[in-house]
Image (cartoon, rainbow, N blue to C red):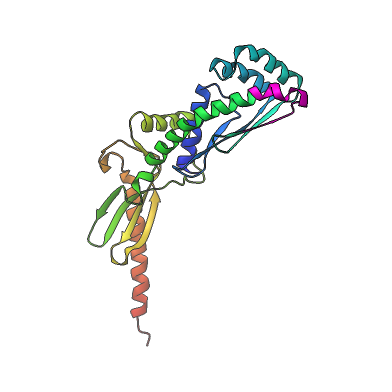
Amino acid sequence: MKLHALLTAAMGRSVLAAKQWPDAVTVSVVTAGCGICVQGELMAGVLCDFIPALAAQHYLHPDAVAHLQALCQAYPVDIRITDGLNGDVVMQGVPDEKVFFAQSLKAALLAALADLIPELEEKEQTLALHTGERCNGFPLFERVTANYIVTAEPWDALPADFTASEAQINAWLRAIFEDGSDVLQVGLVVWQDFGQQRLADRAVPDICIIPPGAPARRWLVRDTLKTLAAEVRRQIYLQRNLTASFSQVRG
């Protein structure tokens, strides 16, 4: 799981819910900052509930609501929304003699998708920027000592055991869209200055919310930095012992 994908799915569900789209329709990432995928399957019962919302949003004529609901109640109508240019809609279960009438429902869904997708894509691009893309490979923080360099990097991949509550996810979305903050999984890395050897790295335990222009001391977890420093010292100790063993001469 990646942080950007997690937030995109939650953002998509929020946008769809505001338009009264059923939970069966979801949003996922194609490539960070380069597109989203809207997909789902709407069974007859779900369609019956959704048709009035389409009419309320002016995608269907009000006079068509009762007739389309009756169609969905009488036949096993099934609509699949698949990825494509502004989404694609595939309708099944409609008898041949009713297909022409049912086309108004398909056209309404396509029109609704065409209006939704630009908003979803714009928000997904914002999420991509604020979950690490804007860093463009550069560290968030760098401290140079005599022999070592400590950097903080944005890591998109989340730990395998990562969990987040709905409240946490909503707080991260508000931080991005309302405050312009970056929301990042941060990894701390220690490099050996000579040869640029990566000695150790460690993820900051919690997702970091970094307000615009905030100094590192406001979000850098010092306990994680101390743990990483101890790990590096241990590696240096082991390397020195290993190197010293080569200088020993046996009689």
**Number of numbered markers:** 0
**Residue at the (35%, 84%) spot, across then down:** 249
Q: Quadrant of residue 101?
A: top right
Q: Residue furthest bottom?
A: 251
For residue 170, above or below residue 70:
below
- Report if residue 94 lies within the magenta region: yes
Residue 55 picture location, percent across and down:
58, 16
Residue 91 picture location, percent across and down:
68, 30
Residue 45 picture location, percent across and down:
68, 21
Q: Residue furthest left?
A: 146
Residue 17 picture location, percent across and down:
52, 24
Instruction: Tell which of 125 and 144 is nearer to you.
Output: 125
**Residue at the (25%, 41%) spot, across then down:** 215
For residue 99, above or below residue 160:
above
Instruction: Tell which of 103 and 11 is nearer to you.
Output: 103
Residue 75 shown left or right of residue 49 in the figure: right
- Quadrant containing the C terminus is bottom left
Residue 176 shown left or right of residue 59 in the figure: left
Residue 86 shown left or right of residue 181 in the figure: right
Instruction: Tell which of 247 and 251 is nearer to you.
Output: 247
For residue 78, above or below residue 60:
below
- Report if residue 207 lies within the magenta region: no
Instruction: Tell which of 234 and 81 is nearer to you.
Output: 81
The span picked out in magenta is 89-104
